[in-house]
C-alpha cells in the first residue's frame, strides 16, 4: 500500500507539470501573451499553481526548447517572436508555414475586385493582350498577429472558376494549387521598407524592414497568377537547398 501510495502521489505532479506547460503554451499560441511578453517569474508561477519551482522550471525549459519562449538570466522568461523559414525553390502553403511554428492560423480576404487587366496587371501576368483578372488582398495571421500580406492577381482566362470562388474556407494560394496544375514558377525576392497599406495590414511602423517575395506561375504557356507576399523582416527567413552545379 505504501508503494502504491507513493506511485499514486507522483501522478498529480506529472499532471500539474503538463497543465502548466499546456496553459502557458495556449496563452502564447492564442496571442494572449504576445511576443515580448514577460512570463511570470518561477516563484510567482509556483505560488499560483501551488507547486515547487522545480516543476515550473521543467515546464519553462520545455517551452524554451521548442522555441516558444526565451529565458534570460536575471531578467526572466519572455515570449519569443517566431521566425519562419520558406523554401525559395518551393511553393509552400502559408498556413503550413504558420502551423509548422506551432501557431494557430487564419486568413482574411481584405479586398477583392474583378476588372479588365491594366497595363501594370499585364506586365505582372506577362499578358500579351488585356483580359479579365481577379485582384485579391489577403491577410494571414499567426495567432493574433499578422504574419504575411498577400497581394494577388489571377488570370481569369486561365482560371475562370476563380471569379466565383468565395475563398472563405481556403486561401487563394492553396485553392489554386489544388485546382490548376502549374508547370513553372518564377521567384523574385527583395527587401523593402513597410509603408502605406502594407505597414497598416502588418501592424508595422513605417520604415520597418520587410522581405518581399514576388512569384509568377504558369500552366503550360499560360500565366496563372502573380502574387506579392510581404513578411516582417525579423520573423522570416528564406532557405534554398541545392546540389552541385556548374556555377562558381
Image (cartoon, grey):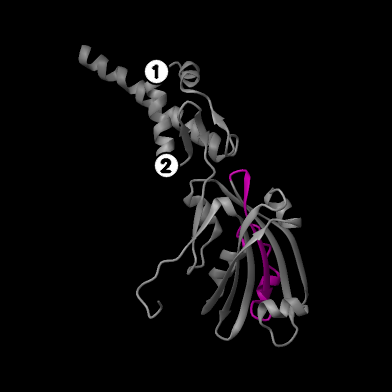
Residue 198 percent coordinates (x, y)? 71, 56
Circle 1 SS class: loop
Q: Is residue 23 magenta?
A: no
Looking at the picture, tell me which residue is in the foreground, 76 or 57. Answer: 76
Residue 82, compared with residue 72, is above or below; it is below
Q: In which quarter of the image is the N terminus?
A: top left
Relative to 9, is 153 on the left or the right? right
Q: Residues within 10 Å of mark 1 (few under 14, many from 20)?
A: some
Residue 234 visible in the displayed image = yes
Where does the C terminus fall, quadrant-wise? bottom left
Where residue 237 appears, as percent x and y from the top left, is 51, 57
Q: Which label is found at residue 42?
A: none
- At a point 35% along the width and 75% down the height, the residue shown is 244
In the image, residue 236 sits, relative to residue 24, either above or below, namely below
Pointer 2 residue: 66
Residue 22 against residue 203 in the figure, above or below? above
* Above or below, 115 relative to 94: below
Work out how far the residue at label 1 is from the one at label 2, CA to CA, in angstroms.
22 Å
Sequence-wise first label, 1 or 2: 1
Q: Give the range drawn in magenta.
A: 143-171
Residue lying at the far front in this picture: please name it: 248
Is label 1 in contact with label 2 (beta carbons under 8 Å)?
no
Give the quadrant of residue 214: bottom right
- Find disc 1 in the rendering and name its residue: 52
Residue at 52% across, 79% down:
184
Secondary structure found at label 2: loop
Q: Can residue 1 be seen in this view?
A: no
Give the crowd class for mark 2: few <14, some 14-19, many >=20 residues within 10 Å: few
| Residue at (53, 61) in percent of width and height | 93
- Residue 170, position in %: x, y? 60, 60
Residue furthest out toward the top = 2
Q: Is residue 185 left or right of residue 8?
A: right
Amino acid at each position: 500500500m505504501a508503494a502504491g501510495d507513493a506511485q499514486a502521489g507522483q501522478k498529480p505532479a506529472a499532471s500539474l507539470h503538463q497543465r502548466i506547460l499546456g496553459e502557458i503554451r495556449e496563452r502564447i499560441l492564442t496571442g494572449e501573451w504576445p511576443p515580448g511578453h514577460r512570463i511570470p517569474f518561477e516563484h510567482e508561477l509556483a505560488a499560483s499553481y501551488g507547486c515547487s519551482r522545480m516543476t515550473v522550471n521543467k515546464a519553462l525549459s520545455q517551452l524554451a526548447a521548442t522555441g516558444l519562449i526565451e529565458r534570460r538570466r536575471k531578467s526572466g522568461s519572455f515570449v519569443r517572436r517566431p521566425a519562419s523559414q520558406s523554401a525559395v525553390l518551393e511553393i509552400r502553403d502559408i498556413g503550413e508555414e504558420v502551423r509548422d511554428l506551432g501557431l494557430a492560423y487564419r486568413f482574411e480576404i481584405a479586398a477583392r475586385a474583378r476588372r479588365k487587366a491594366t497595363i501594370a496587371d499585364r506586365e505582372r501576368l506577362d499578358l500579351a493582350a488585356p483580359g479579365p483578372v481577379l485582384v485579391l488582398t489577403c491577410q494571414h495571421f499567426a495567432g493574433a498577429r499578422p504574419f504575411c500580406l498577400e497581394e494577388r492577381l489571377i488570370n481569369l482566362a486561365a482560371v475562370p472558376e476563380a471569379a466565383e470562388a468565395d475563398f472563405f474556407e481556403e486561401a487563394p494560394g492553396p485553392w489554386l494549387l489544388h485546382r490548376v496544375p502549374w508547370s513553372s514558377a518564377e521567384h523574385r525576392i527583395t527587401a523593402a521598407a513597410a509603408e502605406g497599406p502594407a505597414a497598416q495590414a502588418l501592424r508595422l511602423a513605417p520604415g520597418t524592414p520587410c522581405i518581399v517575395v514576388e512569384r509568377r506561375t504558369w500552366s503550360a504557356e499560360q500565366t496563372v497568377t502573380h502574387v506579392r507576399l510581404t513578411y516582417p523582416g525579423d520573423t522570416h527567413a528564406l532557405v534554398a537547398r541545392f546540389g552541385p552545379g556548374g556555377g562558381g
